[in-house]
Amino acid sequence: MNRHKQILTSIFTASSCILSPFSTFADTQGCEQDSCDEHIVVTGELMREPAKVFTDPKKPRLPLPAYDGAGFLKTIPGFSIGRKGGAGGDPSLRGLGGSRLSIVDDGQHVYGTCGGRMDPPTAYIYPEAYDNITVIKGPQTVKYGPVGSAGTVLFEKDRHSFSEQDMEGRASITGGSADRRDYLVELKAGDEKHYLDLDINQSSSDHYQDGSGNSVQSSYDRNNYNLALGWTPTDSSVIELAYGQSSGEAEYADRANKAREISNENLTLLAQFEFDSELINGLEFQAYTNENDHIMDQFDQGVNSGSNVRRSTYGGHLWLDLTLGDNWQATVGVDYMSSAHEGRAITANVDFGLDDLLSKPFNDNMRYENSGLFIEASVDLGKGTLLSGLRFDHWQTELFVAQQGKRTDELYSGFLRYELLSGNSQYYLGAGHAQRIPDYWEIMKSSSANSAEKAFDLEPEKTTQMDIGWIYQADVELSSSIFYGQIDDYILIDANTKSASAYNIDATVWGGEFGISYPFSDNLSAQTTLSYSRGQNDSQDVPLGQIPPLEGRLSLDYHDGNWTAGLLWRVVAAQDRVSIGQGNISGQDLGESSGFGTLAVNGTWKHGDAILVSLGIENLFDITYAEHISRSGAGNDVPGSEPMFQVHEPGRTAWVKLDYTF
């Protein structure tokens, strides 16, 4: 990645004369910003557009401000996070995790490297450094690369234009239990034709304690910085070159290996143009390259065991926004992505220690590339809008280990959704179909037919899902969504076999989310959300593994001038629908789980437009509990601690955060 560093040096040299404030260049979507949510502390987001949830990651929220993307998504109803410790949580939406959830990092696809999922894609994302986060539920878009059958999450940054030379920024610091420390600095500067956008952040924590005072191996330390330089030749165009780098280390309660290094380096080029044309309204081109490097070992424990894996990914897209007729808009696009995974490891009784590991050559594990073509359109129809999309993906995959081999897959995905606006209500009905190739982690499992081979012959997974919902917005806000999906050739991970294997089954999933926000007065409001998912392994007539139980949240928020205060009560039911040893690449069912309830309190104080202080206490009554979607706690070896059946959640946790805007 030396070429990245050479480019970055040139960028800093060229940017020495750039300064200024900002206005948003990119159009905001719907009502995801402050106009829709007046209270400061966010305890959960209601759906305000069909099949979509928008949220502002810069607002303070419960639980404790997230240091990675998975921790942030946990605050949105429908999401579950498989906890390993303090870092590396693996998100799932409606009980569907792993590659079924598409994570798009400001246009890039950044994939993890670790075979044990120490670094899922969200591990490289510091949420507060982004301007908007959008969740699209179900296979209801085909625009953002390979379709996420569970959903698509967009972590996005705004592009900026400037009317005069100036500068703005913000800084924040967070401190909390278990020696939690976060630092963030953002700077936005420029003039009429140029801008600079810089953010630097750092987050660290020691091992936390559960409600019983037992230490949970969970420490981490992570650093990130991103620099973007933009040229705005006109009011409706921008060209941006951006560089980002992150590095970190972590320990986990579910395994002996420590993550000595989890690093990422990326470079992107983005061009956006708007046109005053009857046919072509806009164009977007983006090219990117990123590389992840990961070292996991037990050298510090005196065990001669370690490996080093890395993944290089590059790609891009070209989108055209078109007007095809009266009230008929469309986006057509092509995209490409290539990713290569390689690794090296200690050889027992031959190599000794980290130096021997780092002196070894890398060996190819797997390579794949994807070429995609899509059209996504909307047309006014009757009193509503009909949205549709169709996508074709061409995949080529090559395996270099075990039996080796090549495979080619041609997949089709699409959706159709009708949205109706009537008074204060929005109604929608959508049908979507997504086809997904087996990912790296699934292929690297053993074949169910021959444990000596990899599961390279897995069939692509095919999800067909119906989504229906009602959204009501007035003094009282209400959102509801129901889904029902049939999954043919669902890729199941089964740890009950001699060597954990992957094979295809047929499955059914259904459930939904419900939320209501009610103002009792100008100062006092309440919000309630419910989420439920159910899954069935139809081929084996057993429950589908890794499905979360019913969950409800009730929040009460009070604000008076510059002060706010709030309560959040989270209640989770027991889960007795399990298939022990079965699940997905993120984890498998360990057993039935007990229900629990936790209470959190929070408050904020704002001084003018510059200073905001927010604080909270979570798990106020210090209960000991574990989420149903969790990893085994057998690897917990902090001195004086005890192994756990599942990784326990933190006990009582206090935190305070200071934001300064300048």
Image: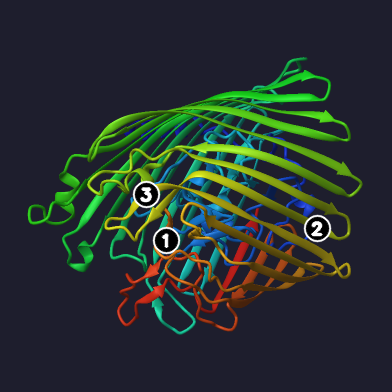
Q: Which residue is mark 2?
A: 478
Q: Amino acid at mark 3?
A: Ala
Q: Earlier in the sequence, mark 3 or mark 1?
A: 3
Secondary structure at numbered mark 2: strand
Q: Residue at x 29, y 46 (%)?
A: 449
Q: Which residue is mark 1?
A: 588
Image spot of residue 455 (x, y percent): 33, 43
- The number of discs equals 3
Q: CA distance from mark 3 to mark 2?
A: 41 Å
Q: CA distance from mark 2 to mark 1?
A: 34 Å
Q: Residues within 10 Å of mark 1 (few under 14, many from 20)?
A: many
The mark closer to the camera, 2 or 1, is 1
Q: Residue furthest left?
A: 350
Q: Residue furthest top?
A: 278
Q: Which residue is mark 3?
A: 502
**Image quadrant in which you'd find residue 320:** top right
Secondary structure at numbered mark 3: strand
Q: Residue 123 vs residue 381: left or right?
A: left
Q: Residue at x 40, y 46 (%)?
A: 112
Q: Residue 240 vs residue 111: left or right?
A: right
The foreground one among 157 and 521 is: 521
Image spot of residue 253 (x, y percent): 37, 69
The mark closer to the camera, 3 or 1, is 3
Q: CA distance from mark 3 to mark 1?
A: 12 Å
Task: Using the rendered image of the protein, determine whether residue 132 is visible from the camera's viewpoint.
Answer: no
